[in-house]
Image: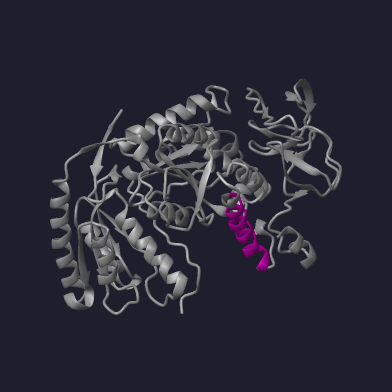
Amino acid sequence: MDIWGYRRPDGRAGIRNHVLILSTIVCANEVADRIFRSVEGVVPVVHPHGCGQLGVDFEQTKRTLVGVALNPNVASVLVVGLGCEKMEAKMVAGEIAAGGKPVETLVIQEAGGTSKAVRQGIDLAEKLVRQARAVPLAPISMEELVLGLECGGSDTTSGLAGNPAVGVASDMLLADGGTVILSETAEIIGAEHLLARRAVSGEVAQELLAIVRSAEGDAVRMGVDLRGTQPSPGNIAGGLTTIEEKSLGCLRKAGTGQVQGILKYAQAPPGKGLYVMDTPGQDVESVTGMVAGGCQLVLFTTGRGTPVGCPIAPVIKITGNPRTFETMEENMDINAGTIIRGEETIDQVGKRIYDLMRAVAGGQLTKAEVLKHYEFAITRIGPSI
Amino acid sequence: MESEQRGMVVVIDFLDNVATAVEDLKAGEEIRVCIAGRDTLLRIAQDVPFGHKVAIAPIPKGREVIKYGEPIGTSVTDIRLGEHVHVHNMVSNRGRGDLPMGVQEEQL
């Protein structure tokens, strides 16, 4: 059965019709933010990067910025730059235009300072919003969805309830012919042998083991116990003792699907099915990477409770902890805590998650959207110079 | 593999030597738990908060702690039946940059 969404010029299906105000450089954040706050119907992307970046680190930041702009949930983009930065606004806008997306560019040094840039930006953004409103609804199908899987603020209920229920919903989307991305490489440490057995080929299994080894090596080379951050202090307070325990629970988000390939941070999956993206365990950086890779919707499990969302993709928040659902209901879309209370089975909650995914894909707002949670962060692989 | 059950604790796999508390457990209380397919009465040795682990088998020092049917780390003391199992009596075996070089290379 079809759902209603938006057909983009490149043929991909969007489930939102956002006009994106995209800052390319930390120096343009304030102007971009003031434009965002002055215009109804736009979403912001601001970040502390865009200058003093070299090589693969620069390329990754650029791939991420262009990737989120080309995400099918975005109707059009206003790129805001300063004028002297490495991440030149016109270059970024050029790559977005090459991807077939309507784009406008605003350069603060050319506009004549803050106030003039903000006024020009508001005019440009309002024009883009009027154009976006004219984009007609179009039938799209579940098989066109790229679903991102994330967990954050985990506790032991995540592995018992929230993640296995998401695994059921993930399997249902794969059965529809859709695409699913599992992320957070550090949270595969200790469970990689189980995931590697599900790889489509020996090569994919080796690639998976290599990214996990590299993430573990980062901690080992720092001469510290990974437990300094994995599990986090909140994870430990919630009963998670080791990264192995956390990972075995995390893996359940990915259901039973076969792993088709390994993606770089912010890389779009080349086909359908289940993929693993090499992202850090920092939730917002990880979600940003998947959304830059084209994911239109995120299922995000939590035990301790976390409010974070995303400017581009709706984030559905699921908690396996019934106490957290009670204390943070404002932020939680699904209570999977019914599983550990014996009131529902994992399959029943998984089906509820799938039904909510369909509704959200059809336009229903998530709690993070209602609360306008627009967190955005790009992971760095080199220092600023 | 998975045993879904109502009650005070959840045991995920037949091989597990720990269970997860889904209520706050008090020292001295006796709870019903399904261990290796058998309904057993387990006496709780120490308070175990909601979400934390309790030993459902004795775990001698240096042995693997098993949850999800997989090792999640190693005990650093003798852990008795019904004891709280957490950072005070077990360690991770992964990402241990704090250990001597030879051990690290073995890990990688």
* x and y percentages locating residue A175 in the rendered image: 44, 32
In the displayed structure, B100 sits above or below A384; it is: above
Viewer-proximal residue, A110 or A117? A110
In the displayed structure, A248 sits above or below A266; it is: above
Image quarter of the N terminus of chain A: top left
User: Is A230 on the left-hand or right-hand side of B36?
Assistant: left
Q: Is residue A206 magenta?
A: yes
- Residue B31 visible at all: no
Res A179 → quadrant: top left
* x and y percentages locating residue B2 in the rendered image: 64, 28
In the displayed structure, A54 sits above or below A133; it is: below
Res A156 → quadrant: top right
Viewer-proximal residue, A250 or A170? A170
Viewer-proximal residue, A207 or A309? A207
Q: Is residue B101 magenta?
A: no
Viewer-proximal residue, A266 or B12? A266
What color scheme is it? one colour
- Residue A27 visible at all: yes
For the image, the number of numbered tags is 0
Which residue occupies 29% across, 49% down? A72
* x and y percentages locating residue B41 in the rendered image: 78, 22
Which residue occupies 48% across, 66% down? A380
Which residue occupies 19% across, 51% down? A40
Main secondary-structure element of the magenta-colored stretch? helix
User: Is A169 on the left-hand or right-hand side of A251?
Assistant: left
For this orientation, the residue located farthest to the top is B39
Res A118 → quadrant: bottom left
Q: Which residues are magenta?
A: A205-221
* x and y percentages locating residue A242 in the rendered image: 68, 49
User: Is A156 on the left-hand or right-hand side of A32?
Assistant: right
